[in-house]
Amino acid sequence: MSDTTRPEAAPAPAARPSQTRIAARAVGRSVAASARALAGRAGAAGRAIAAFAAPVTGVVSTTGWLVLAGAAVALVVAWVFGWIEFAFLGCTLLAAVLVSIAFVFGRMHYRVGIELQPARVVAGERALGRLVVENAGASTSTPSRLELPVGAGLAEFIVPALPPGGEHEELFAVPTNRRAVIVAGPAVSVRGDQLGLLRRTVRWTDPVELFVHPLTARLRPSAAGLVRDLEGEVTKTITNNDISFHALRAYEPGDALRNVHWRTSARTGQLMVRQYEETRRSQLILVQSTEREHYASDDEFELAVSVLASIGVQVIRDATRVAVATEGLALRTATPTALLDDTARIEPVRRAFPTVRDFVREATKRLPPPSVVIAVAGSQLPVADLRPIETLFGPDTETIAFRAELGAVSRITRMAGTTVITVGDLTDLARLVRRVRP
């Protein structure tokens, strides 16, 4: 039996995509690129046509577009089914649009001014507005209609025909029953038909803001004990430079020679330097949680804002450094008026941070170490959720929490290192703050 060696079979050549498939892919990519380019050109052309036609199409109101659509549908139905009634309806609708065109022509030369007196009020106080229209043209103007948005409402005024240089004045009341920033304006003149098919407007003024400040309680100077030092309070931190002497220690390389106590050094035969207890100027941080879920009602939210504003205004008057913040707003603290203007902008927000502690940490991470932290929240926030705030700061920081609980008995409780003050009515705030002893 002889040994024979069989040659190994050669490996099969790797499968290659067919030329047809490759060509199909290339054609598909080319078609897709062409379609994208064509769509881009069509979109650009559409935008250009829309911009060119905007002066005309912008005059047609929503009602006008509905009438035109109804006319088109009626005429199509009349053409397809031969119904003369729909032809009559379509022509009538088109005639209504054509007749209304005459009402949008004309030009006015006005000077319009809006005045709010006063520009800042407390919630519930009276505020009036004044609209003055002057004919700045060389001929007598035709009667026109002016619209003035005021907050969520809309005021309409009829301006009569005015001679050259003539003026027309309108007074209006501004609702100020709740804290808010009320925007009056812009004032626009409106020309159009009585059916509202066509509407041409001209803007004459910029918006004007009316600040409705929250109700505040008058507190005693220095917030009645919240921050009592003017020159600085002593902390437990030891430093080499300050004004409150602590002790002497042996000299170490790098110590400033001005701190050497020469009399003691001569007596002991060893250089001795002074140590001091660090003092610092008060830094107060005032934060309010504005999450809607933390408040039982809108009135309770307003009470919390009033507490925040009352404390902040008094601290600013005492010339104490203060930073005020909510989840969505860092309030200005240069003057009491600036702070009150910003409190008028505070609005409830949806859940912004997992916990109040996370919110306070985010709001204070770029601020100097505070001596007092005041947190304001609502009754729906558990008291236990306020306690972790104190862990964000050192032992020299006092933590105080104000809970707005409308109608509740105002009281002060102590929870570990945090003072919790429940405010049931704004009139109780001054008495409660007087009892606080950081």
Image (cartoon, rainbow, N blue to C red):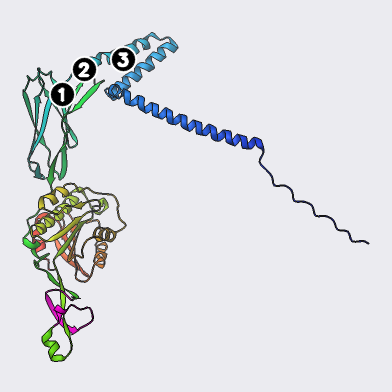
The answer to whether residue 109 is left or right of residue 24 is left
- Residue 145 numbered tag: 1
Structural crowding at the residue carrying mark 3, measured as other residues with C-alpha within 10 Å and reported as few (<14), some (14–19) or many (≥20): some
Looking at the rendered structure, the secondary structure element under dot 3 is helix
- Residue 175 on the magenta span: no
- Residue 382: x and y in percent read 26, 60
Q: Which residues are magenta?
A: 240-260
Q: Which residue matches tag 3?
A: 93
Which amino acid type corresponds to the residue marked 2 in the rendered image?
A: Phe
The one nearer the camera, 64 or 112, is 112
Cα–Cα span, label 1 and label 3: 25 Å
Looking at the rendered structure, the secondary structure element under dot 1 is strand
- Residue 305 numbered tag: none
Query: Residue 60, can we see it?
Result: no
Cα–Cα span, label 2 and label 3: 20 Å
Which amino acid type corresponds to the residue marked 1 in the rendered image?
A: Arg
- Residue 65: x and y in percent read 32, 22
The one nearer the camera, 427 or 144, is 144
- Residue 105 numbered tag: 2
Q: Earlier in the sequence, mark 2 or mark 3?
A: 3
Task: Pick the quarter of the image with the N terminus.
Answer: bottom right
Q: Earlier in the sequence, mark 1 or mark 2?
A: 2
Cα–Cα span, label 1 and label 2: 14 Å
- Residue 312: x and y in percent read 13, 56
